[in-house]
Image (cartoon, rainbow, N blue to C red):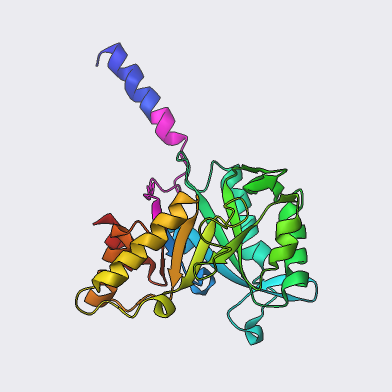
């Protein structure tokens, strides 16, 4: 055997021997999907992680303030000491950012939508305190003295959010989820530095739920909403869109994509991933 070949094989053997026998060669490359929003993300088997495994770039968590802590749950009777905002979202996000990013190697706008279910002022005060703590402060897109500074994650507050309190803050690490039907939230009277996202219930704005063709007037209204928001530097999301797998859901999703809606709401992670990747 030529000496050069022997040395090469020996080197390869050393490299292979350096890898533990239990190490997995698997490397999962997931394409981030800018429009994919995980509604009630915490109800999946692995909150946050399942969404990331499907390429989602926005996740939603409902929070309750109880006994001085922020719990993640759909209903107050479901509060569990093991399921807090810190344990399910803040710690995993911190670890991912420290290890290279939400999606390593790619610059992705990631949103944590936090829906306040308990009284607004006290819950927001507790939320603001934990988000600003030294352990997590580096994670957030922030507003400071008139400017927005981009961070790895944008925290947006929905539900019982205290608008006046948030608006009065000279610095913030969270933003306000506006309502499409509210003129102060969408359009010329809005401020994307406070309200970068506007959301609303699909069924209160549109009668069409995917059967047949979307009425021309409703399609025009949808596109005007998106145009108005984008002109103001805002993103658009609808909840209560059809979410049962089938042609009607896909018809609505196609209209949302065609209109350039920023966040498509779903509980079906695999279904939306498949749709957006087709």
Residue at the extreme left: 212
Residue 199 x, y percent position in the rendering:
49, 67
Residue 34: in magenta span: yes
Residue 226 appears in the picture as rendered: yes
Residue 216 magenta-drawn?
Answer: no
Instruction: Name which residue lies at 40% across and 59% down.
Output: 226
Query: Quick one: 66 or 231, which is closer to the camera?
Result: 231
Q: Residue at 56% of width from left, 65% of height from top?
A: 178
Q: Position of residue 36 (x, y in %)?
A: 40, 60
Q: Is residue 245 left or right of residue 163?
A: left
Which residue is nearer to you in this view: 207 or 173? 207
User: Within the image, what quadrant is residue 145 found in?
Assistant: top right
Q: What quarter of the picture does the C terminus occupy?
A: bottom left
- Residue 124, how many percent across, how many down? 73, 66
Q: Which residues are magenta?
A: 13-35
Quadrant the N terminus occupies: top left
For this orientation, the residue located farthest to the top is: 3
Left or right of 69? Residue 39 is left
Identify the residue shown where x is 80% and y is 76%: 67
Q: Main secondary structure of the magenta part?
A: loop
Residue 274, position as x, y percentages in the image: 29, 61
- Quadrant of the rendered image containing residue 61: bottom right
- Compared to 107, does 63 lie above or below? below
């Amino acid at each position: 055997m030529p000496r050069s070949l022997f040395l090469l094989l020996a080197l390869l053997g050393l490299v292979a021997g350096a890898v533990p026998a239990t190490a997995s060669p698997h490397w999962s490359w997931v394409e981030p999907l800018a429009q994919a929003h995980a509604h009630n993300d915490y109800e999946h088997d692995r909150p946050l992680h399942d969404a990331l495994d499907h390429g989602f770039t926005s996740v939603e968590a409902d929070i309750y303030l109880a006994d001085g802590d922020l719990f993640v749950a759909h209903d107050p009777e479901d509060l569990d000491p093991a399921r807090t905002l810190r344990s399910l979202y803040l710690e995993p996000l911190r670890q991912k950012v420290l290890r290279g990013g939400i999606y390593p190697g790619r610059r992705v706008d990631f949103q944590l939508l936090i829906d306040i279910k308990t009284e607004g002022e006290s819950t927001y005060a507790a939320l603001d305190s934990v988000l600003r703590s030294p352990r997590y402060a580096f994670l957030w897109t922030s507003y400071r003295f008139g400017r927005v500074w981009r961070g790895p994650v944008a925290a947006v507050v929905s539900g019982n959010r205290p608008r006046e309190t948030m608006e009065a803050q000279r610095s913030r690490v969270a933003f306000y989820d506006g309502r499409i039907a509210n003129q102060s939230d969408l359009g010329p009277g809005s401020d994307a530095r406070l309200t970068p996202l506007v959301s609303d219930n699909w069924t209160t704005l549109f009668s069409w739920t995917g059967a047949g063709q979307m009425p021309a007037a409703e399609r025009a209204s949808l596109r005007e909403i998106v145009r108005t928001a984008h002109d103001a530097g805002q993103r658009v999301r609808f909840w209560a869109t059809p979410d049962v797998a089938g042609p009607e859901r896909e018809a609505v999703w196609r209209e949302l994509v065609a209109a350039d809606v920023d966040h498509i709401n779903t509980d079906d992670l695999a279904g939306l991933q498949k749709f957006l990747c087709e």
